[in-house]
Image: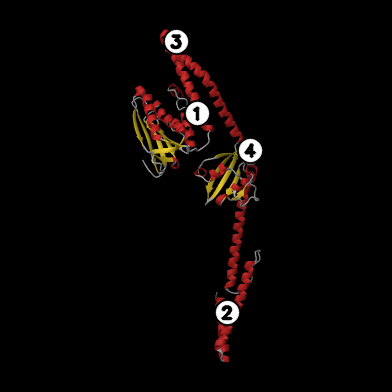
């Protein structure tokens, strides 16, 4: 900086002295300043030419502050190069890691534009990298289910979609969409062909076995019912045995019905939103049945229900789920116990809640209680006629309706089971959807 000031001062004084000698002060001053500017322009031109070079050439030797600027630019350029090399290394390692994954990974930008894909994406989905860069994924995979899944609320949550591979129709893929960053999405496709086939075989076996068992059990039950009607003509010991056989036959029939229901739920499509279900009427019917089931135990029931709150879905499935929760509360609450049933809505959606002051559930059992045939107390559950499938049915019904099951329980104090339904399926009896309405 001082060198530039000194250089300008010399030019100024030289021009001034020359002007005084020649008696042309103004002209000499202008000429001196013009020469100084031309020289300065040449220096800046050298700087510009150096900046235009993309190679790693050393900065030119320039006078004054311009030389300091060159050195600073050269330092920043080197630091940027190191950072760029470091980021490129991270990117290469990321690409190598994702390329070795057994799943297909595709990074999508706005409007489903492909920004990157690994090798498995070609094998599973037919997406080639880098040939298909900047292509819209819907132009390459023409599947309406995938299109609807990615552009709906389902694709922005923890849901999944089972899809046949567009490359190999015998291959079943599980598609998940993970939003990140701004409008970017990570599409992950996993090969679940073997798992899917094994599950399908298991479901078919359960369904077929249940159907085959239903007919002989119906025949046996009919004969036992006929014998029970003639119990007055039979010895008391035989009558007792017939009643026990009828009880166990009824239990087996309930088990088969639950197995068939569960098999149907597992094979049905996910997230169906069908008819409008008048849930308050459904709950009233369940409430009356629960009072009859309570019988001599004389439970105290409280019912709080929004009379206008309905949802879109399957009435048969919802009845199965809600009745299972209420009837479980009756079975596991001692005589004269309190059972509260609530149906309400808030900003989070619609909620069906059953609270009792019964036996309660230990914390270690709660994570597994929705598994099929899982029992907290095996002997006591069997004595009460439970099949061990009720909560598994509840879970699958809620999955079909985009909901979740919440369980809060303490041993000896009681339990609360709450079904949370999303606001998008709420319907009010006046046919207006108002997800912000609260009970």
The residue tagged 3 is 238
Question: 26 or 211, which lies in front?
Answer: 211
Cα distance between the residues tagged 2 and 3: 126 Å
Which residue sits at x=38%, y=24%? 293
The residue tagged 4 is 169
Q: Nearer the viewer, mark 2 or mark 3?
A: 3
Q: Whole-percent x and y of residue 405?
A: 45, 36
Question: 117 or 81, which lies in front?
Answer: 117
* Label 2: which secondary element: helix
Q: Whole-percent x and y of residue 164?
A: 60, 39
Q: Earlier in the sequence, mark 2 or mark 3?
A: 2
Q: Are marks 2 and 4 in contact (CB under 8 Å)?
A: no
Q: Earlier in the sequence, mark 2 or mark 4?
A: 2
Which residue sits at x=41%, y=38%? 310
Which residue sits at x=34%, y=25%? 298
231 versus 6 height, above or below: above
Q: Residues within 10 Å of mark 3 (few under 14, many from 20)?
A: few
Q: Looking at the rendering, in which quadrant would you find the N terminus?
A: bottom right
Q: Nearer the viewer, mark 2 or mark 4?
A: 4
Q: Whole-percent x and y of residue 365?
A: 46, 31
The residue tagged 2 is 7
Question: 427 or 245, which lies in front?
Answer: 427
Cα distance between the residues tagged 1 and 3: 34 Å
Cα distance between the residues tagged 1 and 4: 29 Å
Q: Earlier in the sequence, mark 3 or mark 4?
A: 4
Q: Are marks 2 and 3 in contact (CB under 8 Å)?
A: no
Q: Looking at the rendering, in which quadrant would you find the C terminus?
A: top left
Q: Residues within 10 Å of mark 4 (few under 14, many from 20)?
A: few
Q: Which mark is residue 119?
A: none
* Label 1: which secondary element: helix
The residue tagged 1 is 261
């Amino acid at each position: 900086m001082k060198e530039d000031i000194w250089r300008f001062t010399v030019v100024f004084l030289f021009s001034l002295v020359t002007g005084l000698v020649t008696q042309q002060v103004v002209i000499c001053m202008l000429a001196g300043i013009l020469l100084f500017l031309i020289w300065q322009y040449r220096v800046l031109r050298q700087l510009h030419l150096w900046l235009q070079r993309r190679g790693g050439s050393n900065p030119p030797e320039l006078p004054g502050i311009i030389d300091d600027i060159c050195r600073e630019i050269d330092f920043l350029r080197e630091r940027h190069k190191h950072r760029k090399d470091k980021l490129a290394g991270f990117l290469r390692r990321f690409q190598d890691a994702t390329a070795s994954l057994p799943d297909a990974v595709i990074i999508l930008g706005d409007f489903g534009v492909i920004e990157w894909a690994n090798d498995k994406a070609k094998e599973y989905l037919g997406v080639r990298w880098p040939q298909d860069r900047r292509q819209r994924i819907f132009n390459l995979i023409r599947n309406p289910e995938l299109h609807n899944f990615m552009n709906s609320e389902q694709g922005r949550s923890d849901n999944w979609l089972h899809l046949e591979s567009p490359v190999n129709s015998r291959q079943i893929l599980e598609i998940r969409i993970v939003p990140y960053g701004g409008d970017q999405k990570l599409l992950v496709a996993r090969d679940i062909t073997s798992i899917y086939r094994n599950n399908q075989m298991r479901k078919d076996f359960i369904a077929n076995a249940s159907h085959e068992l239903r007919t002989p059990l119906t025949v046996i039950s009919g004969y036992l019912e006929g014998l029970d009607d003639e119990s007055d003509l039979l010895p008391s010991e035989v009558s007792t045995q017939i009643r026990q056989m009828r009880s166990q036959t009824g239990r087996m029939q309930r088990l088969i019905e639950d197995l068939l229901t569960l098999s149907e739920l597992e094979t049905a499509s996910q997230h169906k939103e069908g008819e409008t279900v008048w849930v308050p009427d459904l709950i009233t019917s369940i409430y009356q049945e629960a009072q009859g089931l309570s019988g001599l135990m004389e439970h105290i029931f409280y019912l709080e229900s929004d009379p206008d709150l309905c949802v879109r879905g399957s009435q048969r499935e919802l009845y199965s789920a809600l009745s299972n929760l209420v009837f479980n509360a009756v079975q596991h609450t001692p005589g004269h116990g309190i059972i509260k049933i609530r149906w309400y809505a808030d900003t989070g959606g619609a909620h069906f809640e059953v609270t009792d002051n019964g036996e309660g559930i230990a914390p270690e059992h709660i994570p597994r209680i929705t598994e099929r045939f899982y029992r907290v107390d095996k002997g006591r559950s069997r004595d009460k006629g439970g099949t061990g499938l009720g909560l598994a049915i509840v879970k699958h019904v809620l999955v079909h309706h985009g909901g979740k099951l919440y369980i809060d329980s303490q041993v000896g104090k009681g339990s609360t089971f709450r079904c949370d339904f999303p606001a998008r399926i709420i319907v009010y009896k006046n046919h207006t959807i108002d997800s912000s309405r609260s009970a």
